[in-house]
Amino acid sequence: MEEKTSKKDIRALTLEQLRDFFVKSGDKAFRGNQVYEWLWQKSAHTFEVMTNISKETRDLLNANFVINHIKVDLMQRSSDGTIKNAVRLHDDLVVESVLIPTKTRTTACVSSQVGCSLDCKFCATARLKRMRNLNPDEIYDQVVAIDNESRLYFDRPLSNIVFMGMGEPLMNYKNVLKAIEKITSPEGLGMSPKRITVSTSGVPRMIKKMADEGVKFNLAVSLHSAIDEIRTSIMPFNAQMNLADLREALQYWYGKTKNRITYEYVVWKGINDAQKDADALVQFCRFAPSKVNLIEYNPIDDGEFQQANDKAIEMYVTTLERRGITVTVRRSRGKDIDAACGQLANKS
Ligand code: SAH
């Protein structure tokens, strides 16, 4: 383990602050740009690798700052090609991120918090209490690690990012936004925001805030039921942030962004597998162009929740399609290494 230190995390500094630091130390502001490029574009883990910077300057940086880079502690590969990284943070907490390959794409599924403060009954992460929010650089590092793995194992760069790992991204909004700014900026990875999806269990206040700020990434909402009573029983926070509030916020989002909304939805036996459930879903998402992803349930427990049968899934598909709502049925990836949706719980 590394020695605990009171030195400042250098990546918490903006470019301007870094330039200022050098000016105050009697150097040129331009030195800040060089170091910034090492930190973000080249993902330097130490000051020693910054070879176009003098030894004296590197010593100065070492005396004042640390680079709190993540470490991929364990990388597991699934039989379907999915890779799961156990990521150790500077304070020894661990989060997980996942690389999901398809024929044409590599998607990174990244975490935004250590644990989660929400209490979805069907999700393994909800059983870990929320320890802390991730910093922007810790989110960024997860993406870089997966980009490197994609180049190494699949011969291509990362193409998409989903915030569907551990945590609720809208409960760590500021840092998630900063990370996305870095991922999309030319000084970072230069990725298009259209290739990034933030998934939320539905925090109305934050959805409106995002709409006001004109963000360019995609929004996915984990709905799972369009009937309050049922949604509250499986996602208890719905008692405080109910479907009417969520819908109003989404309507506001659509009005401002004109971006199609994606709903994530698991159909469980005896919980939401009846015709009335599918009808309620149609009613809920009719106000804007939307797409429903029916995701397979990944069991995490003793059988309290069970995936509905194929007939129920077909019923959902027919009901949605008849009303012109796009629907896809998504198979799980990486189940054998506990890397699928809702399975991230630092088990190994
Ligand atoms: N907190 C955010 C992002 C993390 S969850 C959110 O709720 O959207 C990513 C997705 O996995 C969500 O749609 C979530 O509802 C779903 N999920 C959680 N547990 C699951 C499980 N056991 N099986 C399948 N999907 C699950």
Image (tube, rainbow, N blue to C red):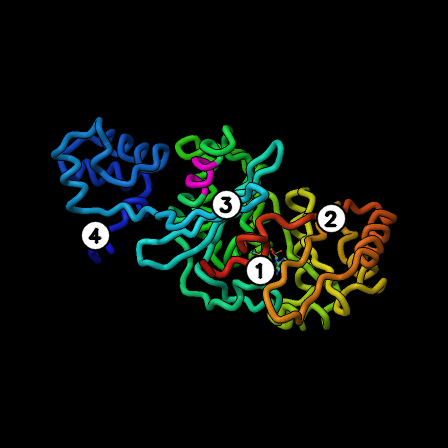
Q: Residues within 10 Å of mark 2 (few under 14, many from 20)?
A: some
Residue 137: percent from left, percent from top:
38, 46
Q: Which residue is mark 2?
A: 329
Q: CA distance from mark 1 to mark 4?
A: 36 Å
Can you tell which of label 1 and label 3 is closer to the viewer? 3
Badges 1 and 4: C-beta atoms under 8 Å apart?
A: no
Q: Is mark 4 within 8 Å of ligand 1?
A: no
Q: How many marks?
A: 4
Does residue 149 show up?
yes
Quadrant of the frame with the C terminus: bottom left
Q: Image quadrant for the N terminus?
A: bottom left
**Residue ID at (53%, 53%):** 337
In this figure, which residue is indicated by the disc labeled 3? Answer: 77
Question: How dense is the environment of label 3, judged by Cα within 10 Å: few (below 14), some, or many (20 and up)?
Answer: some
Magenta residues: mostly which secondary structure?
helix
> Which badge, 1 or 3, comes first in the chain's sequence?
3
The amino acid sitting under disc 4 is Lys
Range of magenta residues: 143-149
Report the residue marked by disc 4: 7
Task: Return the residue nearer the eye: 48 or 248.
Answer: 48
**Residue situated in front as seen by the camera: 271 or 200:** 271
Q: Which residue is mark 1?
A: 205
Ligand 1 closer than 8 Å to label 3 CB: no
Left or right: where does residue 24 sit relative to residue 77? Answer: left
